[in-house]
Image (spheres, helix red, strand yellow):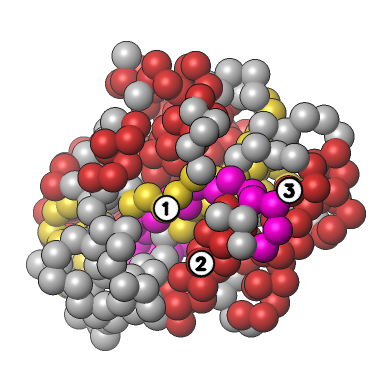
């Protein structure tokens, strides 16, 4: 993986379209650690700012680290208008690659086995349904169904730690409980959780992007970043891992609030075969990174940014 990353990304200018969320900030940190030049554009920047950012200099790739943060999930016609505006400007600027990442479960619920990229779409929530439609439209742009093609790589992955997604919100709350010396609440303690760090998701996206930058004959595509055993464990066990690592002996409280049907697991064999991508951080280390960042955020945003960059470099060191 590291050979492809270091061949593709150093000195490339990458436009990151996203808000001040964990996915966008970790994407910027990982690209910086790889030697890329990043330009960040918030979702409310408007058409003029987008056109100016794309025309100010050669952009080699546009990265959308969190599709839900960029396009939202409420008004589907407005989401599609935003997508058409973005991809239209990208096409006019001649950008050779778009990478769109999403953590929403876009597959029809109750898949009996991990869903591959050919599994039926539909989503288990309204947001998942909307993101499945957004991704279909982006795929249409990539295949040239809406004018000249805009080569697009779509990355589907599990919700990440610290991303604000409802499926992982309690894990950030555990960190805050330790820091505030309050009682943590472990929701559904016997349920298996996926402890995917934003760096691992962005690593997968950039590995796939690197392959397509180095192989311009490839037309893009849709890829799952798969769920793997090392990043999954019961919520009870995850709390014990975090508490032990932080030396916390506080008692916890269990809760069983209403919840949605279980998220579909993802089959990541296609991405693995194409570029060798594998999750690097197990549940223990992903939680440790989450806690480090929570501590840094309590100091300042500058400290948090330094922590993200150090963690990104540590992840790349694991690949060498």
Tag shown at residue 269: none
Task: Look at the image and say whether residue 229 sits in the magenta stretch.
Answer: no
* For residue 213, side relative to residue 149 (left or right): left
> CB under 8 Å between callouts 3 and 2?
no
Would residue 131 be visible to someone looking at this image? no
The part of the image, by quadrant, that contains residue 186 is bottom left
Residue drawn at 82 percent across, 30 percent down: 57
How far is mark 2 from mark 1, CA to CA? 10 Å
The magenta segment: 146-169
Residue 5 x/y as whole percent: 45, 23
Task: Look at the image and say whether residue 164 sits in the magenta stretch.
Answer: yes
| Label 3 SS | helix
Front-most of residues 96 and 230: 96
Front-most of residues 123 and 38: 123
Q: Main secondary structure of the magenta part?
A: loop
Residue 152 x/y as whole percent: 55, 48
Residue drawn at 32 percent across, 48 percent down: 225
How far is mark 3 from mark 2, CA to CA? 17 Å
Tag shown at residue 90: 3
Quadrant of the snapshot with the N terminus: top left
Tag shown at residue 136: 2
Residue under pointer 1: 222
First along the sequence among labels 2 and 1: 2
| Label 2 SS | helix
The part of the image, by quadrant, that contains residue 264 is bottom left
| Label 1 SS | strand
First along the sequence among labels 1 and 3: 3
Residue drawn at 57 percent across, 62 percent down: 140
* For residue 292, side relative to residue 247 (left or right): right
Front-most of residues 318 and 183: 318
Residue furthest out toward the bottom:
258
């Amino acid at each position: 993986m590291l050979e492809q990353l270091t061949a593709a990304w150093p000195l490339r200018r990458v436009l990151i379209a996203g808000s001040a969320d964990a996915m966008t900030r970790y994407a910027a940190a990982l690209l910086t650690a790889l030697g890329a030049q990043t330009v960040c554009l918030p979702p409310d920047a408007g058409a003029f700012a987008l056109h100016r950012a794309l025309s100010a200099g050669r952009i080699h790739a546009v990265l959308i680290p969190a599709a839900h943060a960029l396009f939202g999930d409420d008004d589907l016609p407005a989401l599609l208008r935003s997508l058409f505006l973005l991809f239209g400007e990208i096409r006019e600027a001649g950008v050779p690659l778009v990478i769109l990442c999403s953590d929403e479960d876009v597959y029809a619920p109750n898949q009996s086995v991990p869903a591959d990229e050919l599994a039926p779409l539909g989503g288990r929530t309204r947001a998942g349904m909307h993101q499945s439609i957004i991704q279909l439209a982006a795929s249409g742009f990539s295949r040239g169904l809406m004018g000249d093609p805009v080569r697009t790589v779509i990355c589907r992955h599990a919700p990440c730690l610290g991303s604000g997604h409802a499926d992982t919100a309690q894990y950030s709350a555990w960190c805050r409980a330790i820091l505030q010396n309050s009682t943590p609440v472990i929701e559904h303690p016997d349920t298996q959780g996926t402890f995917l760090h934003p760096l691992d998701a962005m690593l997968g996206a950039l590995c796939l992007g690197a392959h397509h930058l180095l192989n311009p004959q490839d037309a893009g595509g849709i890829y799952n970043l798969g769920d793997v055993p090392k990043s999954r464990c019961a919520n009870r066990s995850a709390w014990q891992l975090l508490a032990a690592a932080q030396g916390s002996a506080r008692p916890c409280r269990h809760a069983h609030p209403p919840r949605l049907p279980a998220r579909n697991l993802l089959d990541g064999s296609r991405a693995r075969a194409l570029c060798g991508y594998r999750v690097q951080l197990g549940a223990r280390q992903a939680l440790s990174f989450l806690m480090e960042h929570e501590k840094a955020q309590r100091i300042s945003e500058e400290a948090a940014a330094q922590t993200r960059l150090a963690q990104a470099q540590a992840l790349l060191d694991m690949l060498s």
